[in-house]
Image (cartoon, rainbow, N blue to C red):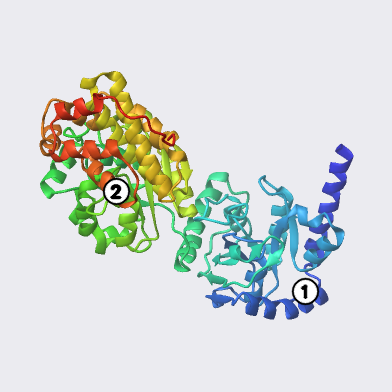
Amino acid sequence: MPRRRLLRSRDLSVYHERIRRRGVHPIVYWVARAVLVPLIRVWFRLEGVGRDHVPGTGPVLVASNHRSFLDPFVLGSLVRRPMYFVAKQELFRNPINGWFLNCLGAFPVCRGASDSEALITSRVLLERGRVVTVFPEGTRVRTGSLREPRRGVGRLALETGAQVVPAAVIGSERARRGWRIRACRVRVRFGRALTFPRVEAPSPRLAEEVTARIWPCVRLQWEWLGGLPPLRRAAVVGAGSMGTALAAVLARAGLEVELGCRTRQQAQELARSRRNDRYLPGVPLPDAVAVSSVADIELAGVDLVVLAVPSEALPQAVAAVGDRVGRRSAVLVVSKGLAGPLGTVPSHYVGERLRTRGVACLAGPAHARETVEGGAAVVLASADADLRDQLAGALSEGGLEVESTGDVAGTELAGIAKNAAAIAASAAIGAGANRAGAVAGRVFSEVCELARREGAGTEAFVGLAGAGDLVGTVMAPGSRNRRAGEMLFTGMPADQVNAALDQAAEGLASVPLLAERARRAGIPAPTLDSFAGLIAGDTTASEWIESIASPQPATERRAA
């Protein structure tokens, strides 16, 4: 094994030595260029912007993002000079393939590790006045936004004094499907060249600082092309308990966060005290969170809008911010109820009315105080895989344990079923624990059947978004939905419960909408129907408890 490794290392060093001494093979390079460049430009409908920013003479270091193995060829076809680039060492194990790539200006690099020989080759080429392309991310990033760079590009720029041209490629990731190269549109943008003083043996810290100046210029080209921006700024609409908690989580993740209150007076009080004593007493607001009214937040300039309002208030909130949210902003919805008047799940309601890059929802047992103080396990659902990955990364950095899924409707309906079941169980406690548990189970099962009939997944009902959140809600001493059920049990009219709680119990408004939605779908839901009657005031709590305490006819029901 050691001999094989030595032979492999020696074989790879041949390519480095050759490229350092001879550069590209003139005949192979120019013939290949004459054949490949027209094909690349036609097949990929290649569009290049800023080509004149690449200097015609002298050493040039092109720093680009990396989406596909095609990127070096795409970039090279737009630059009039021979361009040297690194390629993963596996491509050089075949001698013929390695020789051809080496003739075109490629030299091997060990991905995922510091490769001193590749850095030496790059430095030698730059000192000879060549154009060298590097990919600071260190590997291909096929989806999502750009990753953080490594400091090698800054080190090269300082050691050689070469001009650095930031560049971005978009669309090349769609070209390959298996071994088939598909026609697609690829766009490239070059930025203006950057210059840095030449420094002998720059320190790692200095190299990082230079890299930190280069990479934002690459991001600028990337976003100009329409690439997915990173999450830098967030606005949380709704300064309740969950909105305040999420503002703190996102601030811990390094985002600039604005917490939006309903009125300017509320914003001024919260900004002065730095504590949301009404909804989240005893929890200080992080210094990184700015507070203002929703009307004063410039929503068009934020990357993420969090709608942390009860489902009853969602239509009003969407109407208030709809024309101000930017098309490149993402939206995260944390409501766990149905939006009226048709009983629409929150993410679908928002997606129909806001023109944004994507909508996601959050579910799971995440009670506000514990979320801030000790974290929580949550479910993040979105149909957009890139958005899921990006939001999951930010929430994880903020201290949450995140499960991701593409089943948005199933996740939201599981959370809504949890609220309805928790209220029903608390309202039925007068009939005994057995009957309360049975009522909760039947409500949960009826909503699960509704989700199945409508094409949503049912896995969420047995996971964090459903069963996990239900247990957390029943056990939490401050649970709004559990307390709302207890108030119904005492005979308090449903329309007075939210005022007594000083917060919204989302399950109260959702149960009648769930019952109506089940009727439209043709699904028998007797427990939801009877509970909706109690909430509507058609029956008293004692009458409802008596009805559910009566023996029920045997039925066959699909288990949730």
Q: Residue at x 33, y 42 (%)?
A: 524
Name the quadrant of the N terminus: top right
Name the quadrant of the C terminus: top left
Sequence order check: which comes first, mark 1 or mark 2? Answer: 1
* Residue in front for this viewpoint, 33 or 360: 360
User: Disc 1 vs disc 2: Cβ atoms closer than 8 Å?
Assistant: no
Q: Residue at x 59, y 62 (%)?
A: 173
Q: Position of residue 2 (x, y in %)?
A: 86, 37
Residue 259 appearing in the image:
no
How packed mark 1 is, by other alpha carbons closer than 10 Å (few <14, some 14-19, many 20 or more), is some
**What residue would you read off at disc 1?**
29
Give residue 444's mark.
Answer: none
Q: Position of residue 93 (x, y in %)?
A: 82, 54
* Residue in front for this viewpoint, 116 or 197: 116
**For the residues marked 1 and 2, what is the alpha-carbon distance in whole angstroms?**
70 Å
Q: Residue at x 26, y 18 (%)?
A: 432
Give residue 519's mark.
Answer: 2
Q: Quadrant of residue 358?
A: bottom left
SS at badge 1: helix
- Amino acid tagged 1: Tyr
Seen in the picture, residue 515 relative to 370 is either above or below; the reply is below
SS at badge 2: helix
